[in-house]
Image: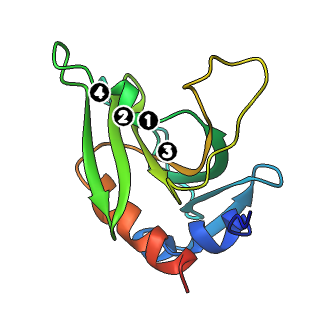
Amino acid sequence: MTLVRPDPYKAASATLGMFEEGFLETGGPMSCTARSGKVTAPQKRDKGVGRPEVNVAWTMNTDPSKLVKASDGSAREITVEGRKAVLSKGSLGCTTYIVWDDQIKVDQDNRVDDDDLTQQIRVQTATCDNAEEVAKKIVAKVAQ
């Protein structure tokens, strides 16, 4: 089984151009955040809007399409560079779950039989307005 080598720094670097004086901040071996290095006064954010940054994390998780429920409309399936993904609007921004390879599944003993894990990139953005564009930049960078 071959999984992609998780490099959250490379993935997050794809979004540096979105920020004035952009820089990367390590969040551990599997996550990295891109944000502006310019110091500004704190601003009140609208409800449902997160921080002006992009957080990228490599995860092993269940099928993100389980987040899509017709009744609430807060999540929707998309395709990012041929990969299955889900955009999920939350109270503090938007999270995009990108399944790196849906053919490679990991069986975790303490889960039900049909709840296999896949390698995913989790991308958190301030809003869902540009989340799909951000996800495309990240996937293109990681695929290099």
- Residue that sits furthest to the right in the current view: 29
Question: Residue beneath label 3, please?
Answer: 41
Residue 37 falls in which quadrant of the image?
Answer: bottom right
**Amino acid type shown at disc 4:** Val
Vertical order, 38 against 109 (above or below): below
Give yes or no for contact between labels 1 and 2 (Cβ–Cβ under 8 Å).
yes
- Circle 3 crowding by C-alpha within 10 Å: few under 14, some 14–19, many from 20: few
Please tell me which residue lies in front, 23 or 97.
97
Earlier residue among tags 3 and 4: 3
Please tell me which residue lies in front, 26 or 41.
26
Label for residue 65?
Answer: 2
Question: Residue beneath label 4, please?
Answer: 68
Earlier residue among tags 1 and 3: 3
Check disc 1 and report its element: helix, strand or loop: helix
Vertical order, 140 against 33 (above or below): below
**Alpha-carbon span between mark 3 and mark 4:** 37 Å
Residue 71 falls in which quadrant of the image?
Answer: top left
Please tell me which residue lies in front, 88 or 15.
88
- Residue at image location 82% in from the left, 50% down from the top: 28
Give yes or no for contact between labels 2 and 4 (Cβ–Cβ under 8 Å).
yes
- Quarter of the picture containing the N terminus is bottom right
The image position of residue 144, as x and y in percent, is 55, 87
**Alpha-carbon span between mark 3 and mark 2:** 38 Å
Earlier residue among tags 3 and 2: 3
Label for residue 64?
Answer: 1
**Alpha-carbon span between mark 4 and mark 1:** 8 Å
The image position of residue 101, as x and y in percent, is 53, 59
- Residue at image location 25% in from the left, 51% down from the top: 78
Give yes or no for contact between labels 3 and 4 (Cβ–Cβ under 8 Å).
no
**Amino acid type shown at disc 2:** Ser
